[in-house]
Amino acid sequence: YTLRQEMQSMVEFACRMLAAIEEYSIKGSKPGDVVVQSLRFRRSLAVNLWSAQDGILRQIRGIGKSVSFSLHMSGISTFEDVLNTTDEQIERAANRPPPFGADLRKASEQILQSCLKLSASIETASNSATASTVICRVERKNPNQGAGTTDIASSCKAPEVSYKLVVYMDGPGGCLLCKDNITGPIEHTVAVPPKFGKVTLRLIASMVGLDGKSSQKTFLRMSNTPQ
C-alpha cells in the first residue's frame, strides 16, 4: 500500500512538472518539439499507456488489464477491431456476459465518431522578405457522422475526446500556435516568418491510439507541397 501511494505521488508530481514544462514552452522559450513531447509524455502518464500496443481499449471505463489482454489474445486490440467483431465474439473473448459486447461496441463507436484529422496548405509569397501563411484545417475523419450521441451503458463508458493543435518551426523559439480543447472542426491561419526552413503541424489527441498519419503535416521552405 505504501509503495502504491509513493508511485501515485511520483506520477502526480511528474504530471505537474510536465504541465509546467509545456506551459513554459508555449509562453516562454517556445520550442515546439518540447511542447509536443511533454504533452505526449503527460498523456501517457495520465492514461497509464506508453504506446498504442499497450492495450488502448483500457482507456474505456470498465475495461481492465485482464479484459484488455483477453481481447488482445483474440485479435481485438483497437477500436476498429471492436466494431468489426460481433457482440458474441467480444463477450466470448472477454468472458463477460451480455450486454458487455454491445456496450463496448457503442463506446468504441463514440470514440471513433469523435476523431478529427488535420489538413493544411501554405501560401508562400513571391517576395522572400514577406511572411508566408499556413492555413490549418481540423475536420472530422468521417464527415457523415456526428460527435457520437449514443447513450453508453455504465459497464463500458467512452471518455471525452479532445485534441491540441501545435504549429512550430524547427529551431529555438519556433512555437507559432498552440490551441487546446479542440472537439470539432476549426480553421486557423498562422503567419510564418520569411525564412522558416521547416514548419510542422501536429494534432495530438487526448487518448493514446488516435494519433494517425492524418495528424501531422510538414512544410519545407522550398516546397509548397506537404511532405
Image: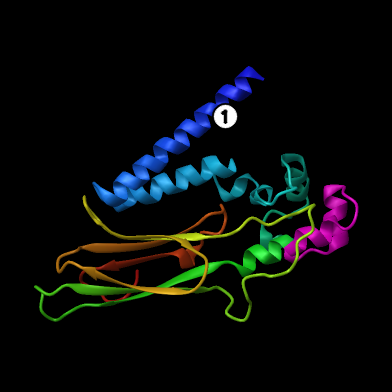
Name the residue located 64 percent from the left edge and 63 percent from the top edge: 111
The answer to whether residue 137 of the structure is visible from this angle is no
Q: Is residue 174 left or right of residue 145?
A: left
The one of 34 and 19 positioned closer to us in this rendering: 19
Measuring from the top left, give residue 61's x and y in whole percent. 71, 49
Residue in front for this viewpoint, 166 or 55 = 166
User: 71 above or below 109?
Assistant: above
Image spot of residue 52 (x, y percent): 58, 50
Foreground of the two, 105 or 220: 105
In which quadrant of the rendered image does the C terminus lie?
A: bottom left
Find residue 55 and report its horizontal and vertical position in percent. Answer: 65, 47
Residue displayed at 73% across by 42% down:
64
Q: Amino acid at mark 1?
A: Gln
68 is higher (above) or lower (below) than 105: above
Magenta stretch, residue numbers: 83-106
Is-magenta flag for residue 97?
A: yes
User: Which residue is drawn at the image coordinates 76% and 50% (left, top)?
Assistant: 71
Q: Relative to 176, is 70 on the left or the right?
A: right
How many discs mark residues in the rendered view?
A: 1
Q: Which residue is mark 1?
A: 8
What colour scheme has been applied to the protein in the rendered image? rainbow
